[in-house]
Image (cartoon, grey):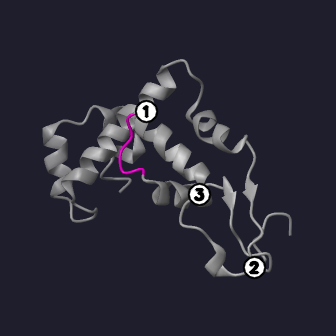
């Protein structure tokens, strides 16, 4: 993906045109779904709009939804873990309002877990925050 998308250069991705889309759709190293490729370009444009719009950083855009602190849950069983939460619902809505696509609440919640906005490690897990 890194190679296909110009080493994640957002400015370049935001300017991709039809030839770039066709190049990506013919790249066997990535998922070749036209809607997802178009979404990557659209999301790069939305990210740039936030960064250049004078409304702060993208980091702030994301982390304000959790008051700039990791949400540490206290789950004891994997069955307790939600697929989404009201916070991921709100962030998903704000991302869509900002022009992002493929940012449903379940994907957003998984992203929040991946980047440390939410710690859903079980209380018995050695990777848990504060252990």
> Which SS class for mark 3?
loop
Of residue 53 and residue 66, the one placed in the foreground of this image is 66
Q: Residue at x 73, y 55 (%)?
A: 71
| Dots 2, 3 in contact, CB < 8 A | no
**Which residue in the structure is indicated by mark 2?**
76
Image quarter in which the N terminus is found: bottom left
Prevailing secondary structure class for the magenta stretch in the rendered image: loop
Which of the labelled discs sits on residue 73, or is there none?
Answer: none
| Mark 2–mark 1 distance (CA, rounded to whole Å) | 36 Å
Please tell me in which quadrant of the rendered image residue 20 appears: top left
In the image, is residue 22 above or below residue 96?
below
- Disc 1 packing (10 Å; few <14; some 14–19; many ≥20): some
Q: Residue at x 41, y 45 (%)?
A: 8
**Which residue in the structure is indicated by mark 3?**
85
> Which SS class for mark 1?
loop
- Disc 3 packing (10 Å; few <14; some 14–19; many ≥20): some
| Mark 3–mark 1 distance (CA, rounded to whole Å) | 20 Å
Bounds of the magenta span? 99-103
């Amino acid at each position: 993906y890194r190679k296909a998308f110009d080493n994640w250069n957002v400015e370049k991705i935001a300017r991709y045109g039809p030839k770039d889309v066709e190049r990506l759709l013919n790249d066997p190293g990535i998922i070749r779904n036209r809607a997802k490729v178009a979404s990557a370009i659209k999301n790069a444009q939305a990210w740039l709009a936030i960064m250049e719009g004078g409304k702060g950083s993208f980091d702030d855009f994301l982390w304000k939804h959790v008051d700039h602190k990791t949400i540490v849950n206290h789950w004891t069983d994997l069955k307790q873990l939600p697929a989404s939460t009201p916070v991921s619902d709100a962030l998903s809505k704000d991302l869509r309002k900002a022009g992002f696509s493929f940012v449903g609440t379940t994907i957003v919640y998984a992203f929040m877990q991946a980047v440390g906005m939410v710690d859903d490690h079980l209380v018995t897990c050695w990777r848990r925050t504060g252990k």
